[in-house]
Amino acid sequence: MNGLIRAPSLPARRSRNRANSSTCWVAVAIFSSALSAPVLANPLAVPTAQYVADFEITRDSDHSYRVPARYVFAGNRLRIELVGIVTLVDLDAQKETIMIPRVRTYWAPTALAKPVPDARRWIGIETEAAEVIGTDTLLGHVVTKYRVSGTIFDIRTPFEGFVWTTAENIVLRAEGVARADGLTTPIIVSPVQLVVGPVDPGILSVPSTFGRAGPSDVGWRQYD
């Protein structure tokens, strides 16, 4: 099972010619039929279902060996838990909020550096193409293995390697290398648990019992 999938190109500009208009309607009908077809694994697309996933992240550092992380995906709302720090992402508002549950404190929401169209920056790989390698099973889920080249994590680390994607487009495993600053270092994101289904909206917001950090409080990076 081999092949290459690419991100779809932008549709051509609509013509005023009647014949071209008819062709356009046929294309719309074909596209609508495709939408009703069974969903296939696709690391270029955002997940089609809400989920909570636990991972262990290993990078070439004494402080990054099997580091536990939890990712909560609910469309345009995300929750990322990493080393005691929780990041809430709201793609509709294009903002993120940092909070430290241990001290019941959150910091004022900040705008994302640049407009981000979807959640792949946090929960997958940002890439334009992926080569199908084969299929496998992880945590009881059938996954498709792809060779990819793009960026990983919200800091957009250059990445080359493989990802394993479920039928819901959930990237369940990533293994490859990071290429930055002239160095090549390994990256492994291993799955521990995956629960697919509606997410409790309450965990995607700052709890009412948390206090907002003031100007005199230390920055959240002091807890990193």
Image (tube, rainbow, N blue to C red):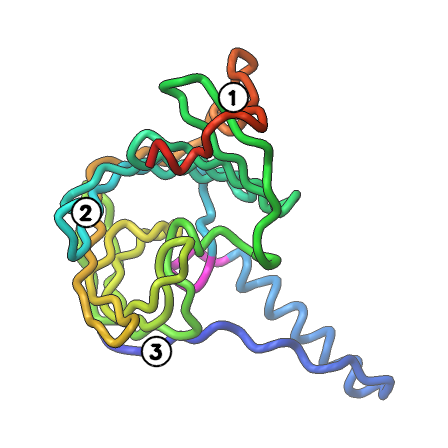
Residue 75 in the image, given as x and y percentages of width and height: 53, 43
Q: Which mark is residue 202?
A: 1
Q: Which mark is residue 4?
A: 3
Residue 131 falls within the magenta-colored stretch: no
Outermost residue to the front: 216
Residue at label 2?
Answer: 64
Vertical placement of 48 versus 135: above or below?
Answer: above
Q: What amino acid does circle 2 point to?
A: Ser
Magenta stretch, main secondary structure, is loop
Residue 44 falls within the magenta-colored stretch: yes
Alpha carbon distance from label 1 to label 3: 39 Å
Residue 156 in the image, given as x and y percentages of width and height: 40, 61
Q: What amino acid does circle 1 point to?
A: Gly
Which residue is more in the foreground, 160 or 114? 114
Q: Which residue is found at the position 56% from the left and 14% from the top?
A: 208
Vertical placement of 76 versus 33: above or below?
Answer: above
In the picture provided, is 79 more to the left or to the right than 174? right
Which portion, as a residue range, is magenta?
37-45
In the picture provided, is 27 more to the left or to the right than 135? right
